[in-house]
Every structure is written in structure tokens, then in C-alpha cells.
Image (cartoon, grey):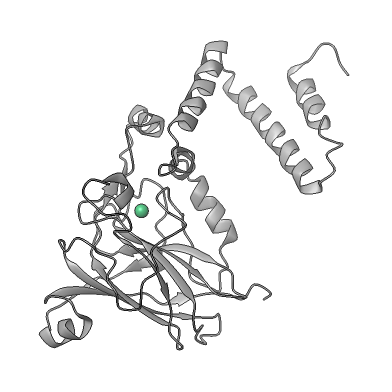
Amino acid sequence: MSMDATETGVVEEAAASFDGTPDARTRQVLQAVTRHLHALVRELRPTQREWEQAVDFLTAVGHACTPTRQEFVLLSDVLGISTLVETINTDPRGTQGTVLGPFHMTESPRRALGDTIDLIGTGTPCVVTGRVTDETGAPVPGASLDVWQCDEHGFYDVQRPDEQPPGNGRGLFTADEHGRFRFRTVVPSHYPIPTDGPVGGLLQAARRHPYRPAHIHLIAEAPGMRPLTTHLFVADSPYIDGDAVFAVKSGLIVEFTEVADPDEARRHGVPSPFRHADFPVRLTREDA
Ligand SMILES: [Fe+2]
């Protein structure tokens, strides 16, 4: 061990300190993180004060986390890392994946096909339909679809517990024997990501806007298939070309078409006119 660390000597010494890590993947991660962080610090050459500011920032991100708010996910999102991880893990034969976002709750209320996820009754009525297939186009019967979205003002239930009942804008559905699913909702709004925490401060310092185009989140899962985490983006939404978290992919932009047919509205159990979005979901086999 060297007693007099040089800029490049210390990185080798620190990386080598993990040589004995028994698990190969853990060893690879620890050594890569060490090397990349050293390279970053050698590039930026922070003062001691700047280094303390960096530690304070990450500390503040941790303190901002609660059971219903994940500031670290938000940080990953605004740096484009969440989208990068999804992109690396997307199977090109299936529907494109995109970020989970900070507002997912593991327990969306279970609902029957055709039910509404809108518990308030304001906003533009909307029907979402789709069909889950595998990579060959064959239906995936009984696939589960966990959906969640903000209301027409751009807020999720957990952000406005005084105005929205828990579970508003959320539903866990099971596709029918043909892989089909449908639910009623309201057209979601574009919205700003939370700006009252340290990630908001970062955006402010960079003069970046915090807005995301309107979208509905969706996780589709079925036994033997790779889980898919994605969004449907509302095609005519503001910010569709400038998502603050870089999550828009062309295959996920869906027309929310206005339907002014009272018979169709009656059939779906919504007022007329309403908007209709159809979103085919293609899953891929885990072993393929
Ligand atoms: Fe969202």
C-alpha cells in the first residue's frame, strides 16, 4: 500500500481494495463505481467546499424521501438515468419501456374490466382499451395491468390527500381470455414534477422547466413474460417534445381521439363526447 497517494495511484488502490469481494457482480459494480467517481472528481477538481455541497445535496435528497415521495427516483429521472436503465432493459421485440416515476404504489386497488379509476367525476371522460399479446401477436390471457395517472389538474392522489381519495387514478386489472383490457378514466394533464425539494432546486439552478407531458403509467405482467413498465403519452399534450425526465418514446404516443357518438358513450358507460385511447401491449417471453 502506498503511503503517498497520487491522483491516479489512489484510484487503483481504492479499486483493488474490492478485489476480495466474493460475489463477482458486486465486485464489478464496486470497482466500476470507484473508477468512474474518481474520473469524475479528477475532471471537476472540486474544492473542499464544493465537495461538502455535493454531500449536503445528496443528504437533502435522502431527507426528502417519504413513503409516498421518492426524491432519489426523481433525481435519477431528471438526470436521464431512469430512462437509460429502462432503455437498456427494453426488449426491442416488445412494447417500448419507460420510467417507473416516483408515484407508483405497489398496491393499486383491484378493479374489474370496464371499471373507472376516476373516483371524482370531473375532467374529460376517457376510455382506454387495449390488448396484451406476446412477441408473435398471440393473446396473453389473464395478463395483469397496473395503471396509475394524475387527475385533470396534474396531481396524483398521494399529492392531494385532502382532495382525492386514496386509489384515485389507480387500478389493477386482469386482461380477459383474449388478452383484452379496458377501463374508464379522465384525460390526465401534463404536470410539473415536485419542485419543492432538492431536485427542484437543481432544476431551478439550471433554468430547466419541470414539466412532463400528459401520460398514463402502466405495468403489464404475465407468468413467463418479461414485466413491462411503460406509459401511454397523450399525443396532443403540451411538452410532448420536451419531457423533463426524457421518457417519451415515439411508440408510446397515443391519440386520445374524441368520440361524439352517444351510442358508443352508452356502451362504455361514459358521458358523450368522450376521448378514446387504444394501446396495444406486446410482452416478450422471459426465456426467448
Ligand atoms: Fe407520471
The N terminus - image quarter: top right
| Percent of width and height locating residue 277 | 29, 74
Q: Residue shown at 76%/48% (left/top)?
A: 25
Q: Quadrant of residue 198?
A: top left
State whether residue 156 appears in this view.
no
Q: Left or right: where does residue 245 sit relative to residue 163? A: right
Q: How many marks?
A: 0
State whether residue 172 appears in this view.
yes
Q: Residue shown at 13%/75% (left/top)?
A: 271
Q: Which residue is more in the foreground, 265 or 35?
A: 265
| Percent of width and height locating residue 210 | 32, 41
Residue 230's place in the image compared with 243, above or below, is below
Q: Quadrant of residue 150?
A: bottom left
Q: Which residue is more in the foreground, 196 or 204?
A: 196
Residue 14's place in the image compared with 177, above or below, is above
Q: Left or right: where does residue 31 sit relative to residue 149? A: right
Q: Quadrant of residue 121?
A: bottom left
Q: Left or right: where does residue 57 sit relative to residue 26? A: left
Q: Which residue is more in the foreground, 33 or 251?
A: 33
Q: Residue shown at 51%/83% (left/top)?
A: 140
| Percent of width and height locating residue 155 | 27, 49
The C terminus - image quarter: bottom right
Residue 72's place in the image compared with 123, above or below, is above
